[in-house]
Amino acid sequence: MANKIDFTKPIIMGVLNVTPDSFSDGGSYPSCNSAVDKALIMIEQGASIIDIGGESTRPGSERVSAIEQKRRIIDVISQLKKVMPKTVIISVDTTSSEVAEAAINLGVEMINDVSGGKDDEAMMSLVAKHNLYYCIMHMQGKPKTMQDNPLYEDVLIEVASFLQTQAKKAIKAGIQKDKIILDPGIGFGKTTNHNLEILKNLKKISSLGYYTLLGTSRKKLFSEVSLANNPVDRLPGTCVTSAIGVMADMNIFRVHDVWQNKQAIDVAYAIKNI
């Protein structure tokens, strides 16, 4: 029986990219042990979900085969499952049902699909069959070219419409509504102004009737607003958006820097609920 996420308070999802080329932490965990150690540190710092990815989706990235994704993540998942608290959930960041199925067989309880169900038609039915949590993200285009020239007539309306459409497809495929999580996809096929517009109006996403996820951690928009060119220098900006997300009723915060964002989230939550 899968763990249930307690959505009564904001939740932290710790990012664990076991990839050589992710924009921020690519190549940081060259061994299975180093990846597991990092996950345990994030859990100790307050992460309730660990999101493991074997394929970078940074702008300009090339696709990675399902076989290679599995090679990167399987040992990490199986080893982490042995040592992590039973209350923590593992999510796998993939658009491939083949990768998802291999992870599900190891006890993974969430699939984080940055294609929102567009890449692999088998994904939604697979998630439904195993009664998992399913995160649907909005992305215009594909990672390799998504930042070339993203255009919208109204970014908020188009993002919200896509998320609602895909959520309805997921329900039709058999996924329970309370297992669906919507992510507006900050930085995925969007200019800085598009991202800022979404962040200013996050209530439009959190009011769609589903649980939600915000992923701004170390994103390029912070360098364009405040000249923080090194991803690790974008922590203050990330914490600001985490606090804004709490005020806008977002549920899950996908971050690289767990304890720092937890402090920002806890303070924002305390202010909001005083």
Image (tube, grey):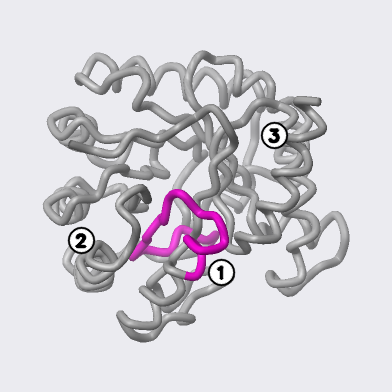
In primary-sequence order, the first of circles 3 and 1 is 1
Q: Which residue bears the numbered disc 3?
A: 246
> Could you tell me which secondary element the residue under label 2 belongs to?
helix
- In screen coordinates, is 28 left or right of 74? right
Q: Residue furthest bottom?
A: 30
Position in image of residue 44 (x %, y %): 51, 63
The magenta-colored residue range is 41-59
Measured along the vertical axis of the image, is residue 135 above or below residue 85?
above
Q: Are marks 1 and 2 in contact (CB under 8 Å)?
A: no
In primary-sequence order, the first of circles 2 and 3 is 2
Q: How many marks?
A: 3
Q: Are marks 3 and 1 in contact (CB under 8 Å)?
A: no
- In screen coordinates, is 37 left or right of 247? left
Position in image of residue 105 (x %, y %): 11, 52
- Could you say which is closer to the camera, residue 227 or residue 255? 255
The circle drawn on residue 42 is none
Q: Residue at x 23, y 71 (%)?
A: 79
> Could you tell me which secondary element the residue under label 1 belongs to?
loop
Q: Residue at x 30, y 80 (%)?
A: 32
Q: Label 3, label 1: how many angstroms apart (C-alpha)?
A: 25 Å
Q: Quadrant of the C terminus?
A: top right
Amino acid carrying mark 1 in the image:
Phe
Q: Quadrant of residue 185?
A: top right
Position in image of residue 98 (x %, y %): 15, 51
Measured along the vertical axis of the image, is residue 72 above or below residue 246?
below
Q: Label 1, label 2: how many angstroms apart (C-alpha)?
A: 20 Å
- In screen coordinates, is 127 left or right of 115? left
Q: Quadrant of the N terminus?
A: top left
Amino acid carrying mark 2 in the image:
Ala
Q: Label 2, label 3: how many angstroms apart (C-alpha)?
A: 35 Å
The circle drawn on residue 66 is 2
Q: Which residue bears the numbered disc 1?
A: 23
